[in-house]
Image (cartoon, helix red, strand yellow):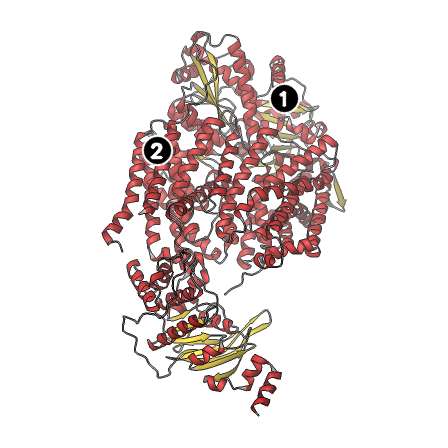
Amino acid sequence: MKATWVRLSGIIGAIALILGAAGGPVPLQPGPALAAEELKISLVAPLSGRWARQGQLKKMGAEMAIDEINSAGGIKALGGAKIVLREADAGDSVEKAVSAAQRVLSREKISAGIGSWLSSFTLGVTEVAERLQVPWFTLSYADTISERGFKYTFQSSPVSSLQAEQALDLILDLAKRNNQQIKKAALVGDNTAAIVFFFKPLREKLLKAKGIEIAVDEVWTPPLADATALVQKLRSAQPDIVFYGATNFPDSIQVLQKVKEFGLKVPFMGVGAWLVTPEYVQALGKELLDNIMSVTAAHPLKGQEELVDKFKKRTGEPFMTQDPLMTYYHVWLIKEAAERARSTDPKAIREAVTKLELTSGAAANALAPGRIRYDERGRRMWAAPIIVQWQGGEPFTIVPAELATRKPFWPAAK
Amino acid sequence: MPTTLSRRASALLPFALLALAGLVLTFAIQERYHHRILTLTLVWATMGLSWNIISGYAGQISFGHQAFFGIGAYVTILLIVHLGLTPWIGMLVGAAAAVLAAVLIGFPTFRLAGIYFALATLAYPLILRIFMDFLGYQEVAIPMIRERAWVYMQFLDPRAYNLLVLAAFLAVFWLSHAIERSRLGYWLRALKENEPAAEAMGVDTFRCKMAAYMLSAAPPAIIGAIYAHAVLFVVTPDAVFGLLVIVQTLVVCLVGGAGSKWGPLLGAAIMVPLSETLDMTLGDRFPGIQGIVYGAALVLVMLFAPEGLYWRFRGLLVGRRSAPAAALQPIASPQPDAAAPRAVATDGTPILEAHGVSKAFLGLRAVEDVSFVVRQGEILGIIGPNGAGKTTLFNVLNGFLLPESGEVRHRGQPITGLRPNRICRRGIGRTFQVVRAFPHLTVLENVMVGAFVRDAAEPDARARASAALARIGLETRADLLPTGLTTLDLRLMELARCMATAPELVLLDEPLAGLGRDGIEVMMALIRRLRAEGVTVAIIEHTMHALVRLADRLVVLDHGRLIAEGPPAQVTRDPAVIEAYLGKRWLRHAEGLRA
Amino acid sequence: MTFADLVQYVATGLLVGGVYALMSIGLALIFGVMRVVNFAQGDFMMLGMYLTYFFAIGYQVDPLLGALITIPPFFALGLLVHRVLLVRVTGGGDPQREMDAQLILTLGLSLIITNATTMILSPMPRGIRTAYATQAFAAGPILVNQARAYAFLMALLLAAAVYVFLTRTDLGKALRAAADDPEAAGYQGINVRAMHGIAFGVGIGLVAAAGGLLATYHPIEPTVAVNFIVLMFVAVVLGGLGSIPGAFVGGLLIGLVQSLTLLVLPFQLQNVGVFIAFLLVLYLRPQGLFGQRMRSV
């Protein structure tokens, strides 16, 4: 009998706890109530755990845009409504990311959302956003994100497969202008989704179509134990270009160190913005990085010097990269949509995004080609990859040439 | 003894209360996010309950249970993506796959124990995780169905998911309850507490572990499939095969208390909402701090309740059930037997024969070419100085060791190499030199483990066990735990447990060790009574003066060899025996004395 | 594939394995003496990496030396952690339940350490740039990375030192006595609880040193432990419980298997080779390579 009482009290205690959590404290509100309506934007990104750095970079970009907008008077069509950021930590698992999205979207009136860096997180988070009918903006590259027939997902980066196609043309063009031939290519990377989607079309048709032989094709599961076998293959094959997808920072460092150790001089073309972050400088040094290139979705372009300066001053970061730039862009985009929609209602904002075409303003200026429109799948039209190159310890846009901030330098091969 | 009706009612009551609590919460909660917390709590409680079957009840700590969770999730989702098969059926396929996996994994892995077993099980989900990445299933999104979504387990209303996981939880809860009350449950607890003793009591430990493993594999697959739909929306190898899954399961079970069907629920009900509340209140503002607070909570709970909160609270509220400080009077004499004694056959047919048995350990010949016979109805004593190989011999007879050469026969049938549990079922019982009690089971439950060899149903086994205790005279101790019992009581309990397996031959290994004069007398009287009831006894003993009075015949071992055999009077005068025990010098001295 | 290629694979594997080996000895000591499953082992390694990093950046101390310097403070830290936390969940006589409690307790500790480090030191990865990380010794056609070679040698030295300590010194023997039979050791006048504390301290000191050595070529971030914790446990169990040389060999073996698997399986399945080898060893020798067979009845 006593045992049953123990059990009962256990259940009651458990119920009490759940109800307590259910009743839960209201999340802390910043500052006093505002007179005008607020536009709440949620940012669901990893802020703790393995990818915390990436999430924090995104947050920096968002905060900069919000400051700019709010100090310039907020959203005019809504009577000067200020934008408020509601960040939610996606942590280091899909479960946590989806929980974060659900938490922030169901507890407050969120007008639009941004996130979540890792494509698996983005896939889960957009499912929530789609069901709750809140427009969601992401920089993730994976094709699948906008292939689900969703109406509320907007993918602002060119998708991986498209990047592969366009980047190859751009690279061949670049090589030709530098009097280099590309006959042999190497595909070297991990099996994360974005890399897989990029390498697939290259491997299956694109390279062959250009008459380029695939001399090395090695994919690993992170973490990489040792890069010797990999780099040895590269050394034996002596490709004219290496497509490189080591998204896990320690893996990438090991590979590049090994490349230096073996004295290998081959042009490296990364796939993604992970290759052009400041931590590379600290870990490898400027000289080692020189001339390494990467295909990204966005990077500061010619004419954005002021923006970059402002970012550097605000955050202390040595330079600006894709992640904060994209989030900055997304916030401005949402602002433009809100102006046109004259509403903070998420459905109205989504509607406005599908209709808009921007050719001026901070959002349009942030990304090439300076003309913003989204197609019926939620993909940004005319989105083209940007090729970035490390020069003197900082990454600069080299392609497209008209928006480049530095001239490209094709590394001497062999 | 409570009536069957009230026992049934008291079994149903918690079940009904849980269902009620679940329903109340489902319909009382307003916020979507809180529904998610409820779903998560029940998912992890169910996962914990399943893990508990193999790791709590059976004591085989598994670090690889997420293999089944992931198999369920992936099989279901791949069937949707490739075949358009509804997950309601898909998850059953997943469950079947998981049970198959359990058999394949369990077969080679159960011979390992402890941390070896735990880590070996971990290897499997880690391998599966890598394979899923390799096969191109890094991120499989569940296709969103807009029309008749319920066919594909997609519900807009979060309450539907709450009810679904509640149903799954209740099913596994009922399963746990059924196991606890069943023969399998007793056997699992026995093998967890002391595997060799359980084997000797007729428990087929391998089959039991396998049964438990298979039972524990199906629910995770089902809950994994539901989790993919209700919580994840996209299945990645890390999300379902990764370490975080088993970590969450361990947290829920070990904080709540393993080995109990309430523990995982308690653990989940506290830790999951705690985690989400921390994320909600602190985590978004100061990312990382929720991890620190959660980690601190884990540390504190383990310092306060290392055995788990359920056991801790139970211990505090219900009080210890070991023997009180004031020792009960030792049993003076056992009760006369109510059941009719078996007909005593004294025709001397050999029950057990050993022919040329040899066993060596790394070159040390423990038993060398030993042959002898145990005849029906006799008390055979096996004596010899320390290290003579007596216990090793018993271990060979009983199936714990495989001899290098020679064979053992039971009623003419060869039994060499049979597992101890099979030998026990054939009617050969065994007690141990150091009493091997099942420490967390009561005296009655200890004996029931033996009784279950003959009775499949719990009430029958209970009755048989009670009768055995009464026969031995230990019924007043029935509800006590072995800790705190006197040596005599412990030995009596072990004997009762052995008798409950209804043996025709018992191998007693030093049953008089550690007993005082009175205890020895009690034990000897009991052994004689057993023989009178038709049980043949082979007994290893050190205490010569007791054995010469008790045994009909003696067999003497020295350095692994049989050096003498015959009636006590003859054997004790055998020069070889004297030399073995006391040495050559004493032999000469004794001869000198005799002369 | 030439013989030279094969030698290169073996060399690479052994070098990688050397650092795994050192990481594992610390865990083996803790496990062997105290039967404690320390989930936070990798996080102490991470802290060791950070300390080495600070010595390198702040005082230009080469990480190979820095690794050694981490040993005393981490030994003290280990003593403290044992005294304050672990002593409550060890040595009570119910090893099964205690392992459960230790698991959760050290898991909690791991969460605290990782998250606190992320918050205080920021999640940005850092690296120590040494000249020898990108240089190699050439032995004919075989290239041996210098950083890894130095780390391997240091690991070997430290492992040898531990072995000598355990077998030749009185304290070491007392530790082993406390591991083999705590009750008997107690009767001999050995303070078993103090022995546990020392074992834990040494174990933490060793893994911190391993971290320092790792930092010569591996970036440092708060979550670095997650890449190594499973391999550490695999190495210890592979080598056999209670065997320090076993853990060392286990670590080397893992590195070797990782490397040689590349000859047989696709690159992506590299770690599958390790796990399969692990399972095979255990199935053939349930007590691990050097472990003691459990005494039967």
Q: Please, what secondary structure does the residue beneath circle 1 have?
A: loop
Q: Amino acid at mark 1?
A: Glu
- Residue A34, percent across and down? 44, 11
Chain identifier of the residue bearing label 1 in the image: A
The amino acid sitting under disc 2 is Gln
In the image, residue C128 above or below residue C86: above
Residue closer to the observer: B211 or C49 = C49
Residue B387 percent coordinates (x, y): 56, 73
Q: Secondary structure at mark 2?
A: loop
Residue at (70% x, 48% y) in the render: C158
Query: What residue did someone put label 1 on?
Result: A317
Q: Position of residue B118 (x, y in %)?
A: 50, 50
Residue B506 sits in quarter: bottom left
Subunit that carries the residue with mark 2: B
Whether marks 1 and 2 lie on the same chain:
no
Q: Are marks 1 and 2 in contact (CB under 8 Å)?
A: no
Q: Nearer the viewer, residue A414 or C143?
A: C143
Name the quadrant containing residue C228.
top right
Residue at 54 percent across and 37 percent down: it is: C111
Q: Residue beneath label 2, please?
A: B154
